[in-house]
Image (tube, coloured by chain):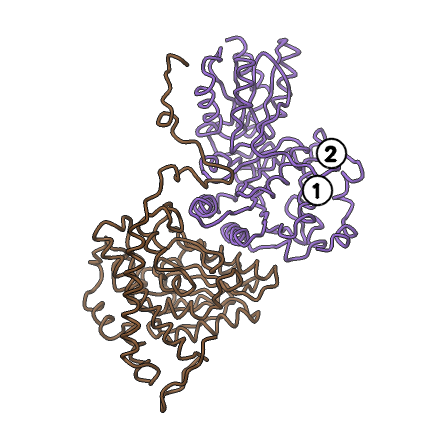
Chain colours: A purple, B brown
Amino acid sequence: MANATLSKQKPDHVRLTEQGKPVTLLEAIREGLWEEMERDPSVFLMGEDIGAYGGAFKMTEGMIEAFGNLRVVDTPISEIGFTGAAAGAAHMGMRPVVEMQFIDFIACAYDMITNYVATSRYRGSGAVPMVIRGPSGGYVRGGPFHSQNPEAAFFHTPGLKIVYPATAYDAKGLIKAAIRDDDPVLFFEHKWLYRRPQLREVLPSDDYIVPIGKARTHREGTDLTIVTYAAMVHKSAEAAEVLEKEDGLSVEIIDLRTLLPLDDEAIVASVKKTNRLLIVHEDTRTGGIAGEIAMRVSEKAFEWLDAPIQRVTAIDAPIPYSPPLEDYFLPQTDDIVKAARWLANY
Amino acid sequence: MANRTPTKRGAAAIPHGLAREQLLDMYRLARLTRALEEKLEILFKQSKVIGGLFRSLGQEGESVASAYALRRRDDGTGDMLSPLIRNLGSMLTIGATPGEVVRQYMAKADSPARGKELNIHFTDYQRGFIGQISPLGDLVPVMAGVALTFRQRGEDRVGMVYIGDGATSTGAFHEGINFAAVKKLPLVVIVENNGWAYSTPTRMQTAAKSFADKAAGYGAAADRVDGNDMLAVYGACKAAVERARAGGGVTLVQVDTYRRKGHAQHDAHTYMDPAEIDRWATANDPIDRYAATLTGSGWATARELAGIDAEVDRELDAAIADAETSPLPDEQEARTDVVAGGPVPGHWYRMDPPDPRKA
């Protein structure tokens, strides 16, 4: 691969870190994708409108010009088709990264992902090193089909890994780790975090990765633990500020970063420290990941708990469109404050 | 390339550029397929094959002849195919061995899927086959992706994927063939119309006049061939494979044949007309027809063919005897290869019963 040629073509919007400038979460992922494309000629991108248009959120802007249409592959509207094609390419030693234009559409490829991709290694049919990524989550008035958090639908499928970063640093390090991983990784990107100015940060200019399967302490505390991920890390952080100011509470926040496999060790360590656990996720309640986390804590740290485990989640409904409805449906900072207060006073 | 030995004086010219040895090789593979399934059926009745047992009776010819049109290598540089459950013949043709098929059916530890998958659902990238999975149609997009990689790497290799009359109704088939056609990928899609999808007849599967007609809707080339005429199947598939190799994109080849058994061994196929099965068996068996062509054209003698039959029998008896000695897998195999990097946790209460009073 002619790297010299590529870097000459490398446009400014993927050189922000190189130039010491801060990046948004979206820009961090874009840089990660670009650098992996430069590093490894077997990495390629595939999805709808990702070429000349650069993707619905412009994640792949400028890439087809730099890497050509054999490595930035525009597809027909065909989530089964391009997910399956990515699996075939991965079998042959390629490292495909496919984009769901909105992660809601991943359900169209549910069979291909769960029956074909996730079982392949187990069936002796070979590894499927591929990444399925896409804009996820609400708070953007996207309605039922542009706001979903479908992680729980795949959380139950052995053979998959699920990643859902909350910061620019993690997003870049995790997309690189996902691409280099030898198993299929679902990489969820919260679109409410994509361009949030508060999340902009200057990233290290070296080629770092963030290991899959490791949680991160977002905020240290001693009175209670909030286990959460993605956009809820930031809502929880807002809540922690309020709780500290108004109640004098010291809240610890564990950002899972990877949902599958869960970092039990980090969760249990924090619970043993604070003895109170609140789980916060944006996904709906029934069958959500909170249930599994609570069960694991019950198995591994029951004696350490001073209060019942609680959760803050969306309500069990499709995601509504109108602002008062979406605001009611989704967990808000105030919900986290109230639940944490209840837990602290138990 | 096989050595070309002269055919008998006065013999007809062999079509499609095939050599006499290749004609005999195709005969051997078709016989091997049928005989292997017959022996598997016995093993099934002895409860030694413990899952389902699927017969391709009447379809062995097209399976062998279609796969025979591929460039077959065992070093990962040849063409690739993905078969259906009734394409044991294609598997054997591209390089699967009877021994591994028997071990797989018997769920042995040293079977290709190490006891985790059934029948002919197994894969070998060196020899060029990717096992199908039971949700039908899924391998059409997957093989489109394999063909995409041939393109990305500038390799002149071709993919072939089999789909039945039934699974042409799936979304995966549509999305996969459309994707491959749009990208003009080197892919041959074999639509095997054997009249039945489990108990559903073809007329309840599609209102189209033929499956070949569907190709036009995707902008793919089409062909339709008598699936019980091995040389015709070979000719059509060879043309499709060479078109794909030359950059001509996707061809859908409709292969008309007939499933002479139920869906699987458990299926008494009462929904089928026995007289119809009989007609296909007596007048239109692909191996009988092929043998008659070989001898009638002066390309082989009946004695030669009988010799091949005997050799096939010996080979299979040895393979089965060998497979029977293989052990079943250790139960801990169930925990391995879910993801890279070690087994998944087992049942803690089985492995290390804890004393809750000491917790």
Which of the two residues, B111 or A196, is positioned nearer the viewer here?
Answer: B111
Query: Which residue is depicted at the point 53% across and 24% down?
Result: A265
Quarter of the figure with residue B269: bottom left
Q: Tell me the residue that label 1 is attached to.
A: A31
Circle 2 chain? A
Q: Amino acid at mark 2?
A: Leu
- Residue B216 in percent (x, y) is at 48, 68
Which of the two residues, B23 or B53, is positioned nearer the viewer here?
Answer: B23
The secondary element bearing badge 2 is classed as loop
Q: Is residue B171 visible?
A: no
Q: Quick check: marks 1 and 2 in contact, CB under 8 Å?
A: yes
- Depicted A301 relative to depicted B192: above or below: above
Q: Tell me the residue that label 2 is attached to.
A: A203
- Residue A84 in percent (x, y) is at 50, 52
Query: Which residue is depicted at the point 54% across and 67% down?
Result: B249
Q: CA distance from mark 1 to mark 2?
A: 11 Å
Q: How many numbered discs sit on the rendered protein?
A: 2
- Residue B309 bears which disc, if any? none
- Depicted B8 relative to depicted B339: above or below: below
Q: Is residue B85 visible?
A: yes
Q: Is residue B356 left or right of residue B179?
A: left
Query: Which residue is depicted at the point 38% across and 76% down?
Result: B23
- Residue B3 in percent (x, y) is at 45, 78
